[in-house]
Amino acid sequence: MTKNLSDPIQLIYAGGTFGSYGRPLAPLSAEIFLPTLQQLLVEQDSSGNLPQISWLDNTLIKDSSQLTPSDFIHFYTLLMNAYAQGDRRFVLITGTDTLSYLGAFLAEAFAGSDICVVVTGSMRPLLDSEVLHNYSVDANSDAWDNLTDALKLAAAGESGVKICFSGESWPAQTVQKIHSHDLMAFTGHSRAAYPANSYIRTLPDTRRQHWLDDQYDIIDAIQSRAEQVRIHALYCLPNDTEVMSHQLQALLSQPPSGIMLLGFGAGNVPYSDALAAALQLAYEHGHMVICASQSPFGGVSDSYAAGSWQYDYHVIAGGRLTIPAIYARLLWLLLRYDSPARRRQRWLNNVNQAGTTIKKR
């Protein structure tokens, strides 16, 4: 049975800058950092403004730049098992390098449920490395504010996966990192469709159990596929057109994978007969090729002939999705479905819910 809003929020620590300390900075072990964080939460919250928390045991603590699809599945499984035990509200602390990718993936994986997950991290460590005789909160760090904001957001219990950072929060699928070291490192927006619009305010116990049964039925297959899945990115540059066609042709002999074409502007990709032929072959071999924009905002369209030609060769438009959101959706579909046709059909259904669909002419 689902717990209510008076029950503790489940807090998960997964590593990253948030728990780093010393000179040079290095992550503290969970055995040292977690008791320190627990004590600081008690000391810093003397007025009792923060919600109650409980710690969800996590064995995977690493730099987020090292995360793999199998690691994403670890967090998915960790959250799902706790959700199956009745917990609904979670805060996940992770590193900022892949924070937007992990958040978007969890949003895809938990679509249709009533789970509440808030993902956060920090650009500066929580602990002050200038103080060596004991562990104390760095007053110049963003870590404490990000954590307390995330806990308060999770306390409200609104269903869905959100990212909370620098005093703001957004649906996870809309978020991208836009600065490498500024405290306001992320941005997003609230004009989100699928998967954000798939979350249910409160699921009846029977429907929640059906949702869980569906997930557990495929978890073994998902974990197995995660070890082999591949997603590639081909970045358009002012090169001879043979460069990209050769890059794509090199992928054709691999098992069906996800491929992102990172085009100029609104998704413009330099045309060549060789690239068109390679795109056709990629489709026939079961690869999913998605066009995204190198621009951080605006997405892709078929307004220009320089971009629209590719959709005649089975390229799928990424619409307004960010690069992390496209990666996350590709990854989930490659893990969740066992055939290229089903993956493609599901993507197109999702895009119809998420924004403008560019149809093959």
Image: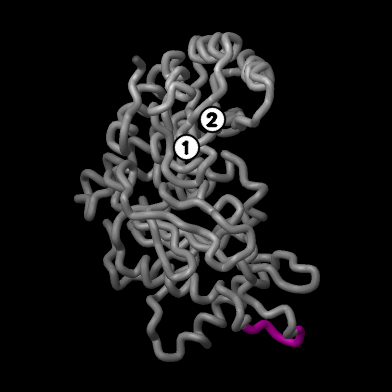
- According to the picture, the residue beneath numbered tag 1 turns out to be 326
Q: Which of the pair 175/216 is nearer the observer? A: 175
Q: Is residue 276 above or below residue 291?
A: above
- Give how far apart the Cα atoms at labels 1 and 2 are: 8 Å
**Residue 32's spot in the image, x, y percent?**
67, 72
Q: Earlier in the sequence, mark 1 or mark 2?
A: 2
| Residue pictured at 74% horizontal, 65% vertical | 26
Q: Which of the pair 19/29 is nearer the observer? A: 19
Q: Is residue 358 left or right of residue 98?
A: left
Q: Which mark is residue 254?
A: none
| Residue pictured at 44% horizontal, 36% vertical | 329
Residue 338 in view, yes or no:
no
**Magenta-span inclusion, residue 131:** no
The amino acid type of the residue labelled 2 equals Met
The residue positioned farthest toward the right in the image shown: 23
**Which image quarter holds the C terminus?**
top left
Q: Are marks 1 and 2 in contact (CB under 8 Å)?
A: yes
For mark 1, give the secondary structure. Answer: helix
Q: Which of the pair 1/266 is nearer the observer? A: 266
Q: Is residue 169 left or right of residue 354?
A: right
The amino acid type of the residue labelled 1 equals Ile
For mark 2, give the secondary structure. Answer: strand
Q: Which of the pair 348/279 is nearer the observer? A: 279
- According to the picture, the residue beneath numbered tag 2 turns out to be 260
Give the number of callouts: 2
Q: Main secondary structure of the magenta part?
A: loop
Q: Is residue 117 above or below residue 302?
A: below
| Residue pictured at 45% horizontal, 90% vertical | 46
Magenta residues span 132-136
**Residue 11's spot in the image, x, y percent?**
47, 65
Q: Is residue 281 above or below residue 48?
A: above
Label 1: few (<14), some or many (≥20) within 10 Å? Answer: many
